[in-house]
Image (tube, helix red, strand yellow):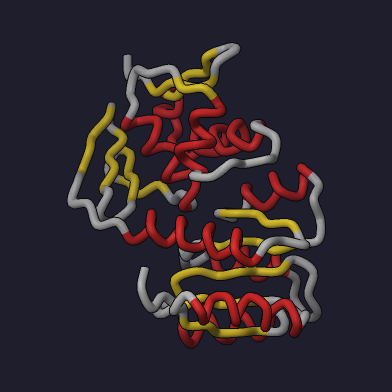
Amino acid sequence: MENATILIVDDEARIRKLIRDFLAKEGFKVLEAEDGEKALEIFEENGEKINLILLDVMMPKLDGWSVLRQIRQSSKVPVIMLTARGEEQDELFGFELGVDEYITKPFSPKILVARIKAILSRVGKDKSEIKDSGGIIINAEGRTVSVDGKIVELSLREYELLKYLIDNENVALSRDKILNNVWNYDYYGDSRTIDSHIKKIRHKLGKKGKYIKTMRGVGYKFEVK
């Protein structure tokens, strides 16, 4: 997405400068915040212009989780969490709150930029397509999902995972295949990340969550019966 605006939220000035320099080279516009309170202030003023947020976890005044919770009350803007922690439970906690990517410090700026481009590319796709699968309606252009006429609030990653399952209806998909196609890069974390997302999607779909079948020893399959 050309001229996309990225909000960098990190209390370390050197980290912000490093990321800003790499993003500037790629033609991105950059906004910066040194703490959680400033981040929310900037987001409130520029929310419609911000295409993605890089959000540090440990910050003064207001930590990254608190910032994310408040942003998710009104926006689905893609969020990449930056953290010094690498524990699996921290990653799963972040995904539960609606994180789209989770990157542990230290990280490669080039890899970070590549992930940003991948997310923006997926979000920016304009497909005039509406698909009804067993009463689960996906509007690809608006990137919305509805069940029985009610909008189901999904994070970007949850939406992409559900859409991938539905696009491959009646096909048993391995966890590795799901990671490669939905996460769009070699994910080195535990594949249980997928299980966590599936659990949350099923809950949000209510009775229609039963259409996502668990294939023991394989992965998952979307099947309407």
Along the horizontal axis of the image, is 176 left or right of 56? left
Quadrant of the rendered structure where residue 32 is? bottom right
Q: Residue at x 41, y 75 (%)?
A: 4
Q: Nearer the viewer, residue 135 or 168?
A: 168
Along the horizontal axis of the image, is 172 left or right of 174? left
Quadrant where the image shows the C terminus = top left
Q: Nearer the viewer, residue 1 or 56?
A: 1
Quadrant where the image shows the N terminus = bottom left
Total residue callouts = 0
Where 208 sits versus 144, above or below? above
Considering every residue shown, the one lying at the far left of the view is 128
Quadrant of the rendered structure where residue 55 is? bottom right
Q: Nearer the viewer, residue 144 or 175?
A: 175
Where 33 sits versus 173, above or below? below
Q: Position of residue 187 (x, y in %)?
A: 62, 41
Q: Nearer the viewer, residue 89 or 82?
A: 82
Q: Residue at x 49, y 47 (%)?
A: 157
Where 101 sits versus 113, above or below? above
Q: Residue at x 58, y 34 (%)?
A: 194
Q: Position of residue 206 (x, y in %)?
A: 45, 33
Q: Residue at x 33, y 53 (%)?
A: 143
Q: Position of residue 64 (x, y in %)?
A: 70, 68
